[in-house]
Image: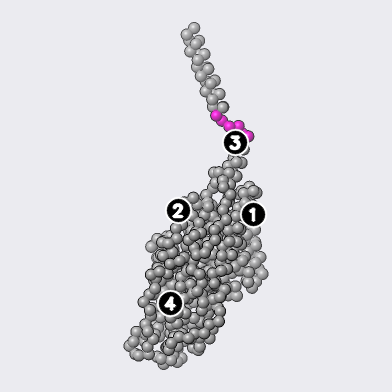
Amino acid sequence: MFKNWILFVAVMVFIFSSCQKQIGKPTIQEEMTAQAKNDTYGHLRQTKTFSSEGARKWQDMQLRILKQPANVNPYGLNAVRNFAYCGIALYESVVLGMPAYQSLHGQLTDMPEMTSTEPGKAYHWPTCANAALAYMNKHFYTATNAQAYQSALDSLENALNAEYQLQVDAVTFARSQEFGRAVAEKVFAWSTSDGANHANDSYTPNGQLGSWTNTIPNPVGIFAPYWGKNRLFVQSSTAGTASMPPPVYSETPGSAYYNMAKEVYDISLTLTPEQIATALYYKDNPGYPSGAAYLPIFSQIMHNEMPQLDFYALAHVKTGISIAEAQIDCFKQKYTLLQDRPIRYIKNVLGHINWEPLIGTPPFPDFPSGHSQTGGAFSAVMTSLFGDNYSFTLHTYDYLGMAPRTYSSFDEMAVDIGKARVYAGIHYTYSCTEGRHQGEKIAQNILNILKFEK
């Protein structure tokens, strides 16, 4: 009797336990309903869970366009400006999927408040990024001389959309596309008021004796005399970045100015094959506009690293703002100081009337070196992202038959670029070393002032 009772109790415990498990387990229909709800509300995938491949393809598309001189000004100011605004649009289109980060509204000068996502609803961040970058590129490069590029922009947007539509439901896709485009519309509209459209307004040099003018042997043109009046992206970005002024003009043998010019001439007489190769590698014509030479370098590093979308967006926006800001400050100084290029002094004062630089002299003042200042800013940002001892090899001009160049750090590259401009005979050493230092300081200011993380 007692054994029967024990058996009865054991059976009842088993049955009760089984029922409890069934009560706690959702039905197949409940699981499907919950999954559908999670796809639309809550459980949102963050930006960091997606590849940056689409964004990298858009940067590659810009590089294709920039190889064609008719599509961009020859010294790359517009290209870098466009890169900066594209970086801002990209970042703002995906930052709401980065919980630890925040919008740059309220931090960048006059930047409008960005469109917000719908609370609790899912967004496919690659689709947002694609819509934003497509809008920006189509509006920046409307004047491309070949219809093929306009078709290529459409093709890239459509190809990425076709890929993304397979990854997400139609409602979320449409919502994401609309959001990315809305962000880009605001960023592009904001860009039109920065003053860049007045950069080449009428200008006549009126400096003192020995200052830069647009007369032979300098090129007769004048390039971007008012670029330095463009709106800064970050207020106080240039605070504490100024160098001591370059040497005062003097024709006295042994004076600082005389020695500065004589150094350029002396170096030109003893150039090694490696120095010539360095100068020609950063000549950037043919190739990319000189100020934009850092964009293919950025692209190469990103293709090497293949970061997730969140890291790529941060890298793009930090790099873009820093190098664009450096160029604004650089041209402000150029047309304030009006330091002349080496060619006039070497011919007219040193008396070497048949001397010519290795590459053509640009049609704007010398100090500071734009290539160097942009390089300093680029180096500082990339070092902040990848460290002081990041080794890389440049393949920018493989397609022109130039040998790749390998560096053990971004700073080493920036120094090399400054030397290249002296080897080329178009800048003084002081203009390059100080330009690099100024660019580094501007980038550090920007990285310190802007608060990306909450």
Q: Nearer the viewer, residue 426 or 278?
A: 426
Residue at the disc numbered 2: 454
Residue 162 marker: 1
Q: Secondary structure at mark 4?
A: loop
Which of the marked residues, 4 or 3, is nearer the chain's N terminus?
3
Front disc: 3 or 1? 3
Q: Magenta-highlighted stretch: main secondary structure?
A: helix
Calculate the distance from the C-alpha at mark 2 to the C-alpha at mark 3. Answer: 36 Å
Q: As displayed, is residue 432 above or below residue 11?
A: below
Cα separation, mark 4 vs mark 1, equals 47 Å
Please tell me which of labels 4 and 1 falls first in the chain: 1
Which portion, as a residue range, is magenta?
24-31
Question: Are dots 4 and 1 in contact, CB under 8 Å?
Answer: no
Distance (Cα) linking label 3 and label 1: 28 Å
Q: Secondary structure at mark 1?
A: helix
The type of residue carrying mark 2 is: Lys
Q: Position of residue 384 (x, y in %)?
A: 41, 61
Tell me which label, 2 or 1, sits earlier in the chain: 1
User: Where in the figure is residue 7, as x and y percent of width and height?
Assistant: 50, 13
Residue 66 drawn at (x, y percent): 56, 70
- According to the picture, the residue beneath numbered tag 3 turns out to be 31
Residue carrying label 4: 368
Q: Amino acid at mark 4?
A: Pro
Q: Mark 2 or 3 closer to N-term? A: 3
Q: How is the image coloured?
A: one colour
Q: Secondary structure at mark 2?
A: loop
Q: Is residue 47 left or right of residue 377?
A: right
* 254 part of magenta stretch: no
| N-terminal-most mark, 2 or 4 | 4
Left or right, residue 139 beside residue 294:
right
